């Protein structure tokens, strides 16, 4: 009889611990989602106000919780790579053209 009370007590304590852990995760996610929403709104305001992509990129790098800013940063980096390759290719073509 005492063994069954002990098992019940252990199960109840485990359930209480899991409920507490669940609430911790829920509140952590709520805070994280709230930060993401706030920073995304801030990024969108900055995006539509600014006319220069480099300024937007610098501002977006500071917004670590905004998924929209992260997508913009990734796109900006890729655009920079394409532009750099295009400029390098044009310069190389001009050099080859001047050799003829």
Image: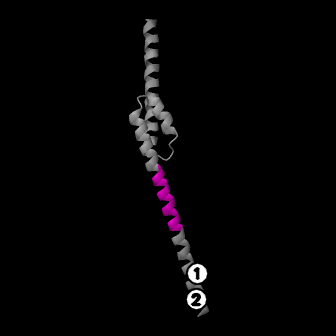
Disc 1 is placed on an element classified as: helix
Which one is in front, 79 or 40?
Answer: 40
Q: Residues in magenta?
A: 21-35
Which one is in front, 82 or 52?
Answer: 52
Q: How is the image coloured?
A: one colour
- Neighbours of disc 1 within 10 Å: few (<14), some (14-19), many (20+): few
**Residue to which mark 2 is pinned:** 5
* Relative image position of residue 39 (x, y in whole percent): 46, 45
* Relative image position of residue 29 (x, y in whole percent): 48, 58
* Relative image position of residue 90 (x, y in whole percent): 43, 17
Q: Is residue 3 above or below residue 48?
A: below
Which one is in front, 34 or 69?
Answer: 34
Quadrant the N terminus occupies: bottom right
Quadrant the C terminus occupies: top left
Q: What residue is at 48 percent from the left and 38 percent from the top?
A: 60
Is residue 49 something that shows in the picture?
yes
**Residue to which mark 1 is pinned:** 10
* Relative image position of residue 37 (x, y in whole percent): 43, 49
Disc 2 is placed on an element classified as: helix
Decide whether the magenta segment is chiefly helix, strand or loop: helix
Labels 1 & 2 near each other (Cβ < 8 A) = no
Q: What residue is at 61 percent from the left and 92 percent from the top?
A: 2
Asked whether 46 falls inside the magenta stretch, the response is: no
Q: Is residue 11 above or below residue 50?
A: below
Q: Is residue 42 left or right of residue 6?
A: left
Which one is in front, 98 or 62?
Answer: 62
């Amino acid at each position: 009889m005492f063994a069954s009370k002990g098992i019940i007590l252990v199960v109840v304590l485990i359930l209480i611990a899991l409920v507490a852990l669940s609430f911790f995760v829920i509140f952590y996610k709520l805070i994280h989602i709230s930060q993401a929403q706030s920073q995304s709104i801030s990024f969108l305001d900055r995006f539509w106000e600014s006319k220069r992509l480099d300024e937007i990129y610098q501002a977006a790098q500071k917004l670590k919780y905004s998924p929209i800013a992260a997508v913009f940063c990734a796109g900006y980096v890729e655009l920079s790579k394409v532009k750099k390759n295009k400029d390098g290719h044009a310069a190389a073509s001009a050099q080859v053209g001047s050799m003829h």
